[in-house]
Amino acid sequence: MSLTRRSFSLITAAGLGLGVAFGAFSASAADKVKAAFVYVGPVGDFGWSYQHNQGRLSLEKHFGDKVETTFVESVAEGADAERVIRSLAQKGNDIIFTTSFGYMNPTIKVAKQFPKVKFEHATGYKRSKNVATYLSRTYEGRYITGYLAAKMSKTGTAGYIASFPIPEVIRDINAVTLGMQSVRPDMKMKIIWVNTWMDPGKEAAAAKVLVSQDVDVIIQHTDSPAAMQVAQKEKIWAVGQATDMTAFGPDAHLTAVIDEWGPYYIKRVQMVMDGTWKSSDHWGGMPEGDIVMGPIHAKVPAEAKAHAEKLVAGITNGTFHPFTGPISNQAGKVIVPAGKTMSDGELAGMNWYVKGVEGSIPK
Amino acid sequence: MVRLEPRQQHSQAMIYLSPVIAIILTLLSGLVIFALFGKNPVTALYTFFVLPLTTIYSLTELLVKATPLILIGVGLSIGFRANVWNIGAEGQLTMGAIFGGGLAIWLHDSSSIFLLPGMIVLGAVGGGLYGAVPALLKTRYGVNEILTSLMLTYVATLLLSYLVTGPWRDPGGYNFPESRTFPDAGMMPIILEESRLHFGSILAVMVVIGGWVLMAKTVIGFQLKVVGLAPAAAKHVGFVENKLIWFGLCLGGALAGIAGVSEVAGPIGQLNPSISPGYGFTAIIVAFLGRLHPVGVVFAGLVMALTYIGGETAQIEIGTPAAVTGLFQGILLFFLLASDVLTSYRIRFGRPKVAEGGAS
């Protein structure tokens, strides 16, 4: 009996709550652009999600009270993502940035039901009328990382903590390797797949395994600074992922490849304001200011530092491309002939290792 | 000195009141936590625990989220009753998803009405067989099933990851680690339009009823309870403990396997490396919060689902961090265990009285 009464009063309360929520919503909707962000990790991962959140903050700073932002962090890639994205669309957001690969299908699905809301999915390949995609040319920074790694390594072996065997990761592994070989053709690259974007425990364990295999420069494609901390302890080098991780390894931080999402976020929100937003595939790098190198460690010799800066300048003004032939695959067969540069299409689907990478791509 | 002294008599009412007390204490702690975050505690609690119940859509989402927790929770609670500690439901869920999802990938052009039933059966078989591994190790070699079932979880996750990055990868998917999407015939039918509420929830209801009948009305249910409460007595009257270990682990595995199929053929629609955000582990809390009773598991599953959905709602509405969800789940478990301890023990201060010696 009491149960019936309780559920009845709950329904009444529900009705009231709905009314209140609706009233609040229509009051605040006055011509502000509402932008929402979905993150795969916590904003405190000091890596990928942290950097997207920095982009969100610069959006707020740029537009002031003309924009209102919301974010949801630590959203699992899977059944949960769809609910979060739909809730954000229902809340009246104008543009929603979903910032991890696993959000691709949920984003496409929700976008169909909300044709007026704009969606931006990072790192995926499915687009529609109201779903755009965007990604950074991290490989540009990775190449420079590789060059510096080869300059500083004593053992001649670098290690890569890899997340998932998708083209983005394969491409970056190759870019680092090519950068290393530009100064030390015999330099080796060892890879550990951790099958996660963010798991400090696994990342640290992988870093330790690499150290035990004679690796003295660690590059990571995962989001926490755990490997950087291991490098600091083991007195070897490591490269910051997505953000400047100097604080976690002041003696180990060789450099970092920093994703600056702010410029893109500002551009796209501006387009929403102007009514010029259109679905597109954005792939920005150093020329657009989307990829920036972190500070190069003071122990790096001036000559190497100058060369690295020259490479950055070359990539930025378009005179140099990291994936310029000759490039051979692991079997030694030349895939990209001398003087040729790989096209964006070829880079987008890259599924083979260049010569010098150890092991095979997980199949 | 503080000691715990067993109570002579257990209060039957307290066994069922203890989760209620735990929930109330959790809510009270919530007030404090939100105040520390600088949020209005009442608004925050309302946003977290009530707002998700105010729209039809979020109610259906609550059921979608609770479905795998209830499916697994019922199976685990039956095993736990007989002291069969299956910690590996996450792995059994994964294996069920692989078996059931594998059929959908293999028959990706099928429009047969038998595809989905076939997937559900295969999911149960996959999960059940995976539960059988710790059962075999326990009954044959005496290996602790807590350890083996937990560790096998990682094996299952890696197998799934291998399959979706290799043989079962979507041929049109640019090497990205996910399978092709399932055909419509291999998807759980939606039972309420404009929502994600699917047939898996009906399966969960059936499983709850089945679990209740099993425990309350059948001989094997009786045996499971006796083994759990009084192992020595059970042995004395000749109940075969090994048989019950097999039963507990295989049944728990099969139900977790069905939960796996229900997820991949429900809201996900394909196999990918992250099909479950730890439902198999959360269901352990659900089983205990539900007092190891199938009907209790329903309420517990809904409460746990609410902590997830409330956490998301609070992030969107008032900007609390995602960690609050985990915090609430942890606090809830803490208070539940504390009330359980205080139900069966009393706290005594000072040294034990020597005079009691020999009285028994």
Image (tube, coloured by chain):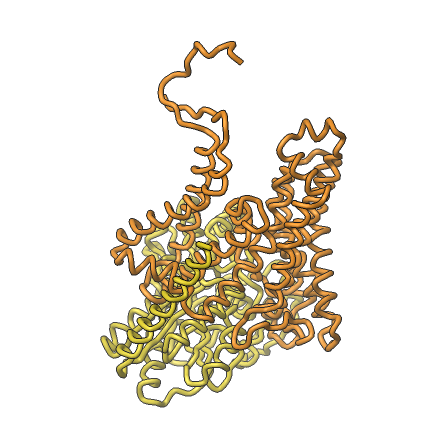
In this rendering, the count of numbered labels is 0
Residue positioned 46% across, 71% down in the render: B56
Residue positioned 74% across, 33% down in the render: B239
Q: Relative to A169, is A191 above or below?
A: above
Kindly indicate which chain is depicted in yellow in the rendered structure: A
For this view, does A114 lie left or right of residue A24?
right
Between B45 and A206, the residue placed more toward the observer is B45
Residue A104: percent from left, percent from top? 52, 73
Residue B328: percent from left, percent from top? 40, 51
* The quarter of the displayed image where residue B324 is located: bottom left
Residue positioned 52% across, 63% down in the render: B63
User: Can the viewer see residue A304 in this picture?
Assistant: no
Q: Residue lying farthest left?
A: A65
Residue B166: percent from left, percent from top? 67, 65
- Image quarter of the C terminus of chain B: top right
- Image quarter of the N terminus of chain B: top left
Between B199 and A167, the residue placed more toward the observer is B199
Kindly indicate which chain is depicted in orange in the rendered structure: B
Between A233 and B300, the residue placed more toward the observer is B300
Residue positioned 65% across, 45% down in the render: B216
Q: Relative to A65, is A185 above or below?
A: above
Residue A154: percent from left, percent from top? 47, 51
